[in-house]
Image (tube, grey):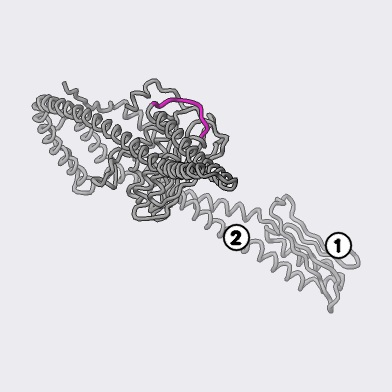
Amino acid sequence: MLSKHTHHPESPDQRGHARQLTLSLRNAIVLGIGLGILIPAILLGTMLASDSYQREFDVRVRSPLKQYAGMLEQTMPVPLWQVDATSAQSFVNSVMLNPDVVRIVVEDAALGRFVHAEQANVQKQGLLSETRDIRKDGAVIGRVTIEMSSHLMEQEFLKKFLKGGLAILVQLLISFFLLWLLFQRRMMRPLQQLQRDVDRLGQGQLADAVSVARADELGSLALGVDSMRLRLGELMHEQASHNATLEQRVEDRTRQLHASNQELRTALEDLNTAHAEIQRSDRLAALGSLVAGVAHELNTPIGNSVTVASTIHDLSREFNKKMEQGVTRAALQNYVDNNLAASDILLRNLHSAAELIGSFKRVAVDRTSAQRRVFLLDEVIREILLTIGAGIKRNVHEIRMDIPPEIRMDAYPGLLGQIISNLINNAILHGFEGRENGLIDVSARLLDTEPASVELSVRDNGIGIAGANLGRVFDPFFTTKLGQGGSGLGLNIVYNLVSDVLGGSIHVESQPEIGSSFIMQLPLCAPGHEDMGRRLL
């Protein structure tokens, strides 16, 4: 049965809790309006108040102070020169009539204080003073000091500031209230009604139309929601009709999928069988190529041995004829020297043939038995290269080996030989196509890893691999020689042997017209595989 999943709308309590966690749209807009009105008013009011205060301060304190100081500077020289303290005091008292003037001191250069006036009980805050020298005919005869306070001015300015601020605050409150009222009536009420309609639609109640308050943007939104209501009703009706036949269609599709899966399993079994047959054919072909190469290599030392043996036979028959007529010491010595030289050549060629046959036997046994043993990597690779050397020479290519002699492995030398042979044959077949004098480097180095491992690489200077094919070279049945002798399993077999049996990894690096490198990382001790025999069959 097909399970049906229904959507449960949130309850009003859940929506209320969500609104408590986040700032609602209304609160956000109200807060934005309030801050948009208040912050500019505060900043502009502060600037205007500061400017007004400076102007008031200049008019009430700073400018009068300089004027009074200049006036006393002009009027005091005569009374001070004539030592007329009464006249000087009258001038000072006239200036003291200004309530902002706190103290005036007139001093004689010779006698000290001459006239002094100071208001009692006056705040000493915000005092400014001005001192001028009193001169007579260019000579300083005294000085006058006047002090004024900004306290009264500041009190008056504060009262005016408070009145103006209160007026601005009232204006701001009225503006804010009008904006809030407009926002509440024109936006929030239609939105709240639309929210109620949407909640009703979410609960599946599609019979009633969505309310449209007025023909504005929110009204257009409400019309869109109502259109959605109508479309949703149609879709629900279609869904109900589809559900009526859905289970039958699911059963039909299930039967079809079951039949398709059965066909795919059969095809997969056939494909695995074909895969195994092709792998077996490739291994037999590789072994046949190995035998042919060894036979070709044996032709040279065995042919040389036959030639030398035939020469010895002819020399012995000729010497036998000479013995009937009598043998001289020189002829005897010549016969012995020729026999020694021929025997030496014969022994060297037979020894080479014996080494080649021994290497072939070891490689063939490793290939067929998949026996695990401890071996030196350079010896195994050298034997493998020796057995496939004939094929390389026929293709006019060169193989170089750079493997330290101390690398010892506990693994499967036969599988390693199959890997190296496949990589070299792949380089000859694909990398050196249409080329001569190709170069293949087989190198190895120990890696500082845990567990201990070795990096074994096979590099060629061939045509390289196209970038589009670089990620597919290890895929089964992928070959650029389809129908030309390529099965597409050589590198796939290499990948499976390296990763599944030897417990290592392999990757390829290639650049067009420069060459390709197959780099393997193999543990010095291969993991155990009880079913490895079945893998190789």
Q: Is residue 44 above or below residue 315?
A: below
- Which is nearer the N-term, disc 2 or disc 1? 2
Position of 310 with respect to 249 (left or right) is right
Q: Within 10 Å of the Cα at label 1, are there few (<14), some (14-19), or many (20+) other Cα atoms? A: some
Looking at the image, which is closer to me, 149 or 366?
366
In the rendered image, which quarter contains the N terminus?
top left
**105 relative to 325 in the view: left or right:** right
Is residue 499 visible in the rendered image? The answer is: no
Q: Amino acid at mark 1?
A: Arg
Neighbours of disc 2 within 10 Å: few (<14), some (14-19), many (20+): few
Label annotation for residue 54: 2
214 sits left or right of 292 in the view:
left
Kindly identify which numbered label has been placed on residue 113: 1
Please tell me which residue lies in front, 239 or 533. 533
Q: Which residues are magenta?
A: 369-377
Say above or below: 420 vs 46: above
Q: Given the image, on which type of amino acid does mark 2 rest?
A: Gln
Percent x, y of residue 386: 45, 40
Q: Quadrant of residue 114?
A: bottom right
